[in-house]
Amino acid sequence: MNKNRYLLSKIFRSRIGFILILVTIYWIKTLLAYLIDFDLDTKGFYQNFILFINPLPIGLLFLGLALYVKPTKWFYRSVLLLYTLLFLWLFSNTLYFREFSDYISISTMLASSSVAGGLLQTTIKSLRIWDLLYILDFIGFAYFSFKKKIPIDSKPFNHRASFAVTALSILFFSINLFLAEIDRPELLSRGFSNTYIVRALGLPSFLGYNAYQTYHAHKDRSEASADDLVPVQDYVHQHYVGPNKDYFGMAKGKNVFYIHLESLQQFIIDYKLTVDGTEHEVTPFLNSLYHSNETFAFSNFFNQVKAGKTSDAETMIETSLFGLNQGSFMVQYGGSNTQQAAPYILAQEAGYTSAVFHGNAASFWNRNNTYKQWGYNYFFDKSYFTEATSENSFQYGLNDKVMLADSIQYLERLQQPFYTKFITVSNHYPYTTSLSGDEIGFPLADTKDETINGYFATANYLDASVKAFFDYLKATGLYKNSIIVLYGDHYGISNSRNPSLAPLLGANSETWSDYDNAMLQRVPYMIVIPGMTKGRIIDTFGGEIDALPTLEHLLGIDSKKYLHVGQDLLSPDNQQIVALRTPGNFITPEYTSYAGKLYHTQTGEEITNPDEDTLKKLEVIRTSVKNQLAASDAIQTGDLVRFLDNGLPTVNPKNYSYLDSLKALEAIEAELGNESTSLYSKNGEKSTVDLFQAPSYRNLHESNPASTSPNSSTSSSSSSSEKKE
Ligand code: GP9
Ligand code: MN
């Protein structure tokens, strides 16, 4: 016993013992910050376990480096220096987070000294009394070293032993990373959000990760020059197609509503799910829009996203440039690249105010930073809405009806004309956990795949949410003054699940092919122009990249001077070549190239031995696809918009803040007085919040029990709210 105690005290008095004590204190302090300062949004035991352990490997790795220093004095100096650096990084992040709800990135640090000056002020403002806890150890060190009570071990570690400590901490770190990847596959390659990286790997690793990404972005950026703009501009000019004279400017000056239909695929439109012999229309409201003569509805509109999923769709819709071949553009470049996106273009060209509404944390997909570069005046994220509970939300945010209802108090204060985007989320994988209470009722499909089974119910919920929003627009009169564009961002059912979906689509699982997968990449794209009668279903082939020039032309803005690589889908000259983001994949009305195979688009028949004539046509398509992606990539990775001189001043992200937005909006109304064009002002300063009504599924159907088949397993069937796809 005594021997053990002797050994223990010997270890604590040794160099490694000292390091272990410091690692432990660092660990405790980090957990403190996780608990009281950061909002890491962890769910379930597994995520909390990873959070609990993640300060250890990196702490040991970092402080263990001091072991390589042999002279006693220098060993203690370096270990304290390293420890202080770890502390400073932790502490400055806690202060920064209190103000900005985000972590310090390399670009924040590189920002100009004026920002640094501002930071110092906010830092002092955000100090809290419990911050004393963060520096208790330093007070302790000072006291003990003054009293000469810190045991000094003059016996250095040999290099082999030091290396063993390094190797061991790398091993621990790999285990940490492995566990994190199980929890969130593709964590590092897709990035998602700073929060995801911090909660999985800790703050020092986040710095390393961010530094790596920043370095890459910077490298491409610094190698690019104004000369690179020349071929890109040539491409854009040649590829440009003029507007359709019949439609140009037909929605000029109107408010724009974008409704992002999460994971909604085109096959859902007009689809009826048959359960126990009864047919259930999944999206009755969207179907009515699809067939309305107020709507340009597209039947061959494809999603063109890759790993950036929603963020890729947003990038294309807002800028008519593609996401990246790897990872997410918004995460890697969105916050730093100069861009000319829809909100900014419309503000400059036609005095539009812009806002995004989304019930998830602002940092997801780096939206908080990207939106500033896009010129969004306001971003109403989760923090602006009803407290999220397990009843009204799931891992990706608030249920759509709640989000939309809560948006009204802000929407009605925006000056008109405005450009707004509502990003829905309830119809998101795994489709089984987001609905509860009275929203349960739409029947589940009956396949072996739970994901597919729930998809129709969440899509139906999305449909009802959109309908409620349209009802509100009509009730307030906003409707006739607006143009509403709806789009599905990407597939909801992944290719690997499609064979199980096949029977529901009247197809055969056994003969399901890559051609069928390609065709399922269609997503809804509908442009509703209230009062118009020219609406119809249009079969032009296009994709998300084409949305911005299409919208611009409807608003009477010529897209010619912008660096867009898409083409107006209403233009008679549209070429109808849809490039998918995976190299080699494309779809045209005639040919489909997908997963290395070639098909006739109309029949699905595979082309194994193309004749001369076909080869020639394919060559033209392939070159066109390659050029389009290459032009976009050159712009995105080289940050080429910064060299563009088309008369628009460069966006300054520092002019945008997403804090206290309601106050800012009220101040604008007050300043404008009678000139204020907000709905609230126009309505005699009376709120329209009560005009938003979104009855629950049960409320809507209880008068008609025949169409209700309650199925309580919608919300409880999946044990995990943390499924990812
Ligand atoms: C989260 C949401 C989902 O905020 O937009 O993104 P996704 O997983 O579809 O890319
Ligand atoms: Mn999405």
Image (tube, helix red, strand yellow):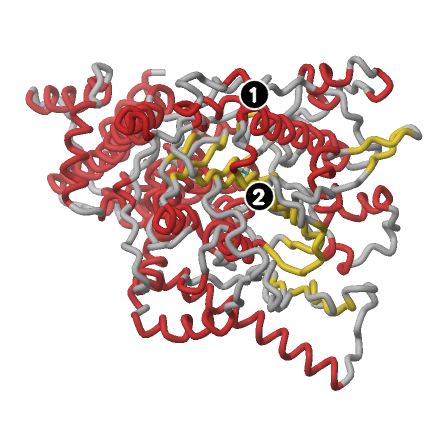
Quick one: SS at disc 1?
loop
Spot occupied by residue 637 in the image (x, y as percentages of width and height) = 40, 61
Can residue 24 be seen at all in this image of the molecule?
A: no
Q: CA distance from mark 2 to mark 1?
A: 19 Å
Spot occupied by residue 309 in the image (x, y as percentages of width and height) = 56, 47
Residue most extreme to the right? 277
Can residue 275 be seen at all in this image of the molecule?
A: yes
* Ligand 1 has an atom within 8 Å of the beta carbon of the residue at disc 1: no
- Relative horizontal placement of residue 705, taking residue 34 as reference (left or right): right
Spot occupied by residue 351 in the image (x, y as percentages of width and height) = 36, 44
* Amino acid at dot 1: Phe
Above or below, 166 against 713 in this view is below
For the point 76% across and 47% down, the residue is: 498
Asked which quadrant contains residue 582, the reply is bottom right
For the point 57% across and 43% down, the residue is: 485
Residue under label 1, please give it: 692
- Relative horizontal placement of residue 462, taking residue 241 as reference (left or right): right
Ligand 1 location (quadrant): top right
Residue under label 2, please give it: 485
Asked which quadrant contains residue 9, the reply is top left
The number of numbered discs placed on residues in the rendered structure image is: 2
For the point 52% across and 59% down, the residue is: 325
